[in-house]
Image (cartoon, rainbow, N blue to C red):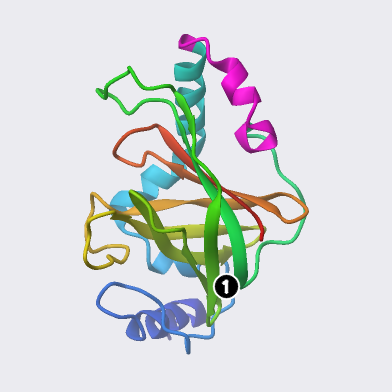
Amino acid sequence: MMRPLVALLLLVLAGCTKSDELQPYAVVRRADVWQAVIKDSDRSRLARLSDAWEQARADIAAANADADLAALGVVGDPAAASPGPLPVAGRYRCRIIRLGWRQGADRLVPPVQAGTWGPCTMAADGIVLRLETAPAAQQFTGTLYPDVDRLVFLGSVRLGDDMGRLRYGEDRDRDQLGVLTALGADHWRLALPWPRWSARMILIEIRAA
């Protein structure tokens, strides 16, 4: 006889689009729903989140840029966490922070690059949230899935001259994934390890609008 969880996941997958996005009517409240969506090739990438932090901090130390990391405050501390509530649908402020250098990339750029604050949104879609940062040279869009005391992000990056928008799974080089945790009241961090391009780690710092 089919186990209940297996049957549940099959129902979820049956309701997915070609790009493996969950539909609003898929009322599932298990923390492992994102496991049915993530690509097998990305599982180890997400599991090595702590390695990305470690290597990014090593790059920063090698460039004597520890003061720049400290200036980020709690968002630059990999151990920072808060029991505060996770975000809900609404309008927020976000900034993009890049840490470390991608292997083989030009090391003339600083290992800590903090962008300016801009508007971002989270829209409710069934049990998940759809995140969209402000239009820019790189715009991050994707889905935040519940996972106990955090949210798992599966999305993509849209370049400034793109005409359309890609979903997670449509272009491996664009796929982005990470973990969103609370840092305090109305303060969150989305950590994206191994973003494939210019950094070891991308952080999206999020605050209430």
The C terminus is located in which quarter? bottom right
Give the answer, above or below, for where 27 lies relative to 18: below
Residue 72 among those drawn in magenta: yes
User: At 37% across and 32% down in the image, what residue appears?
Assistant: 199
Q: Which residue is nearer to you in this view: 67 or 81? A: 67
Report the amino acid beneath label 1.
Arg
> Residue 196, image x and y in percent?
30, 40
The stretch of residues the image draws in magenta is 62-76
Residue 201 among those drawn in magenta: no
Left or right of residue 97: residue 42 = left
> Residue 140, image x and y in percent?
40, 56
Left or right of residue 97: residue 79 = right
Task: From the image, tell me which residue sits under label 1.
Answer: 30
Left or right of residue 72: residue 103 = left
Give the answer, above or below, for where 110 lies relative to 158: above
Q: Which residue is nearer to you in this view: 179 or 158? A: 158
> Residue 132, image x and y in percent?
46, 63
